[in-house]
Image: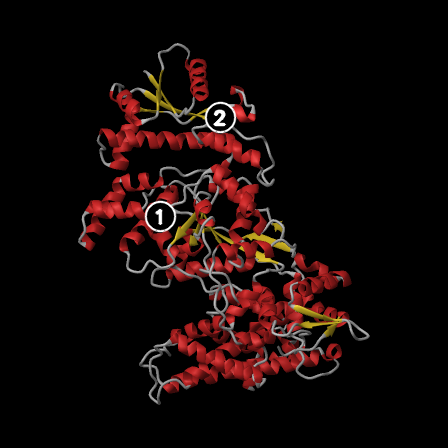
Amino acid sequence: MSTLVLSGARSRVERELVREWTATTYGDDGVRVVPDDGRDLAGALDGAGPDTTVVPVRVVWPPAERASSDPPALSDLLSLSARRRGLRHAHARVRGWSASRGRVVAGDAATLAQLRREGDRELGAPDGAGFVAFVRRRATLACDRAERRLTGDRYKVPRLMAEQIVASAAVRERAAALAGELGLGVDEVLGRTASCLEEMAAVQSPPAIEAFRSVMSPLHRRAWELDVDTSSLGDLREQGRARPLVFLPSHRSYADPLVLAEVLHAHDFPRNHVLGGNNLAFWPLGTLGRRAGIVFIRRSFGDDAVYKFAVREYFGHLLDKRFNLEWYIEGGRTRTGKLRPPKYGLLRYLVDAADQLPEDSPGRDPLLVPVSLHYDQLHEVGALAAEQGGAGKKAEGLGWLAGYMRDQQRRIGSARIRFGEPIPLRGALRDAGEGTAQLEKVAFRVCLGINRATPVTPTSVVTFALLGAGGRALTHQQVRDVVAPVRRLLADEPAIGDLDTDDGVAETLERLVSVGVVERFDGGPQTVWSIGPDRHHVAAFYRNGVLHHLLDRAVLEMALFAVVDSGRELAHDEVLEACWEEALALRDMLKFEFFFPRKREFRDELLAELERLAPGWATTPASAGGAAALLGRADLLVAPRTLLPFVESQWVVATVLADHGDASGGALDDRGAFLDACTGLGQQWWRQQLLQGADAVSRELFTTALRAADNRGLLGADATQEARAAWRDEVAAVRDRLRRAGEREGELRADVFGGVPGAAQQ
């Protein structure tokens, strides 16, 4: 049996290192060293027998040892560049390197017979040139894997992407089917596919990754201190060695991908392929980012069937080769501070791509990883809040990037990164069942995982308290008194332990003052704090980060209020069932605003919340009392501040919709004009104090309310005014109940607010 060493050496020094390694490893057994260029390799393969062993090798010049969390240094960039470029010998002389710094790494060997079988399976009996190209690709990938054993998994570099995809026999077969549907030639479809792949595919390069980290680090490194829960990362990294990971984080800041990348880099995860919109592909971000793992995809595919085909095949290739993916399931940054409804498009491509992989491929069942990215403060939150009121989004570009980088130079708290329970894709699809809602259920499960992983922050609790003050300024002690019952309700949240102290509350208030959310007044005998003028949307952004932690309690409170309002005399068990019916009705009304678990799990959560409100109530019916008695045990009502902005926003939309068209209804054709009408009515009602909070006037919330109306069949031509009016009245009834709950909360806080009615209704 003979041996063929396939050398990737690119300089005289490297060729000498490979020669010495070959002599040491194989002795004088007649081993042949062949450069991996096409001409010499073709001749060597033609003259070799089927038992010939092919061993791919490469010379690596490792950088100096550095901690994985250290920022990149210029010497690292030079070192990494030297490993990849043809001028290695020049770099070596400049750095004073000797040949002893070089390391020869060998990829997994294979016989020529094995390579021909694999080439036949992948390419469909390739010709001579096709087989040579296949062997070169296999050699490159094998050396990449060997190099990772030396440099670590964080440099898992995908190479020759477009060539591998288009050369695949399975891809060519699917391309032929598409060509038949489009009436095009197969070669034209494959050519356009290759062009699309070149446009979108990330070509990761270690020098580019380090350069990208260095150039982009001012966008996040100074602004936040990283607070990472690392308890699950070891297991997750091990699972990632067997199957691809699909990271699905919440999206709050432009810096999200940079922050997450630093965390994963520090824990030796390979670089993710981050899917982003091509609106960020401007120079230099696009040029450098594409080489550092960012996949720039068109924001709209339209009817371009070939582009869709290329995306699906690209996903399939990445999954099959166990490359990790990352995208933001909300489709854009949140404007309200809570998760936006998920987008399903990329998830659909992921499922389709996984479905067409072989049964034994690791990419058939990737792990979906919910990730929570949560910040104490954001410099960009003002612009996000302004967009809710109808302000235009500033276009990204070089000037925008410079301004954003300037804003990010001041420390504004912590960035908290938490990883939710991983979800196997196959299991999630099976649990979701068949039908058109399958993907929606999977996406909602991911979003529920994000919410459950998201910690409560001190800023979210303090803004929750201040927005409940009815516009009044509060002293330090009043802030503490309003925060205290919320803190008790969230006793299991360690991140807000500082709010138990005077200094912790003061520090949080000052952070909010520093970014203009809270206004501090020192001109009187006591210092007081309040939400600044025209900053209610910004304050609501921070407040909304805590809402999903209070959602079960809020729904339970409103269910109890509804049972009390019914005036029915109910037995103990009947109270529970009546509350459950009311909770389901409210869940249906708000299902596009919040992420609720499946009904059985939701019921268990409400029962657990009931036990916290009234311990032993469910098991001691003789002394328990009814719904009114349960409400009487509450020292805090969170429903008004948790739900009212969303119900009032829905009330605005329902009112405008009820007045739309003639007496017989009418289709809603111009949604832009309709949202403008909602904004106008909302602003009018806010000025008339018919709305409790300015944050209810939000195009984001109005858009979500339209989805609720559409779900009820109220937007089409067959929708009647009677049905629309019934929806308006239903929402108005819930709104009135929330207002009365707010009055009750004001009474509970009367000692804090000096007995001023309505102070806690917001």
The percent position of residue 117, horizontal first and vertical second, equals 27, 30
Indicate the secondary structure of the residue bearing disc 2: helix
The picture quadrant where one finds residue 721 is bottom left
The percent position of residue 699, horizontal first and vertical second, equals 48, 73
For residue 438, side relative to residue 91 (left or right): left
- Marker disc for residue 24: none
Q: Residue at x 28, y 59 (%)?
A: 303
Query: Viewer-proximal residue, 523 or 42?
Result: 523
Looking at the picture, does residue 721 appear above or below residue 208? below
> Can residue 59 be seen by looking at this rendering?
yes
- Marker disc for residue 90: 2
Identify the residue under disc 1.
199
Query: Viewer-proximal residue, 342 or 368?
Result: 342
The image quadrant where one finds the N terminus is: top left
The percent position of residue 98, horizontal first and vertical second, equals 54, 20
Q: How many marks overall? A: 2
Contact, mark 1 vs mark 2 (Cβ under 8 Å): no
| C-alpha span from label 1 to label 2 | 32 Å
Q: Residue at x 57, y 42 (%)?
A: 266
Q: Amino acid at mark 2?
A: Ala
Looking at the picture, does residue 692 appear above or below residue 386? below
